[in-house]
Image (cartoon, rainbow, N blue to C red):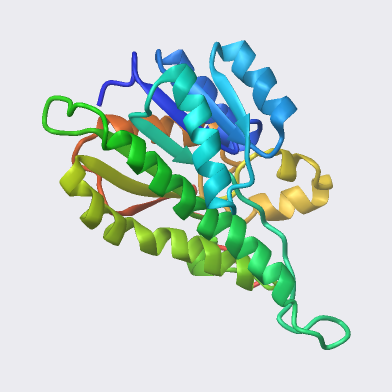
Amino acid sequence: MQISGQSAIITGGASGLGAATARHLAGLGARVGLLDHDLAGAEALAAELGGAAAQVDVRDADAVGAAMDAVVAEIGAPRLAVNCAGIADAGRILGREGALSTELFARVIGVNLIGTFNVMSHAARHMATLEPLEGGERGVIVNTSSIAMEEGQFGQCGYAASKGGVASMSLPAARELTGLGIRVVAIAPGLFNTPMMEGLPEDVTAKIVSNIVGPKRLGNPSEFALMVAQIAENPYLNGTTIRLDGATRLPPR
């Protein structure tokens, strides 16, 4: 798929990996629509890029549908949808008082996994209305997993389970949607220089970087955005999860 002239919808587009993806795709000539819980941030970036924005809680399927419909009315049905909305709240299975942290677990699953499914389903609904491009392709959905899908750390049961679920959806979603001309691929990023990382003390950041094989640094969000574009442009990528991690393997803590 050639990105120039196409519409792309990005969730979590107000900051971090989502914002970098929006900027990169807009730079390649795409019309971008941003869905985010942070409406002010999404609107500011959309204004900068000449795109559209809407507020949404991705856990709410009806709200996702309404927000996507509103953005589509401005930029057109998406050829590309990128799921970057997510949270990384940590919590033990047994809390300090011995209580199960079920509420936190459910919230992380709700945003990261159910939210991804909601956006994927509504994006596919719009893509299915488009005329196929050369080769029969109508659209591409890129979901964000994490290397925690395989190496979840202490206190990350919810996060690891949610991101493992995103990765596991890639193949069955591709099998189902390929008949409509829609590809589905997930990216599993490693340790990236996002706002969450920028707020950590230098010694903590140094310890994190020590686990990265090479390049010996945090990933740049622009490198995630580049991978999104490469997935869109390569028609044979489908139904898989790509680790983007500098050969990082996470330790237990």
> Number of callouts in the render?
0
Q: Give the vertical position of 23 relative to 163 (above or below).
A: above
Q: Give the vertical position of 60 relative to 33 (above or below).
A: below
User: Foreground: 169 or 243?
Assistant: 169
Q: Give the vertical position of 36 relative to 177 (above or below).
A: above
Determine the residue located farthest toward the right in the rendered image.
Answer: 97
User: Is residue 94 toward the left or the right of residue 11 in the image?
Assistant: right
User: At 67% from the left edge and 57% from the top edge, which residue is drawn?
Assistant: 88
Image quarter of the C terminus: bottom right
Q: Give the vertical position of 105 relative to 63 (above or below).
A: below
User: Is residue 190 toward the left or the right of residue 204 in the image?
Assistant: left
User: At 65% from the left edge and 54% from the top edge, which residue is drawn?
Assistant: 210
User: At 62% from the left edge and 12% from the top edge, which residue is drawn?
Assistant: 48
User: At 53% from the left edge and 37% from the top edge, which residue is drawn?
Assistant: 66
Q: Quadrant of residue 81?
A: top left
Image quarter of the N terminus: top left
Query: Can the viewer see residue 125?
Result: yes
Query: Can the viewer see residue 84?
Result: no
Determine the residue located farthest toward the left in the rendered image.
Answer: 135
In percent of width and height, residue 201 lies at 84, 47
In percent of width and height, residue 9 lies at 47, 31
In percent of width and height, residue 109 lies at 59, 64
User: Is residue 230 toward the left or the right of residue 36 in the image?
Assistant: left
In percent of width and height, residue 50 lies at 55, 11
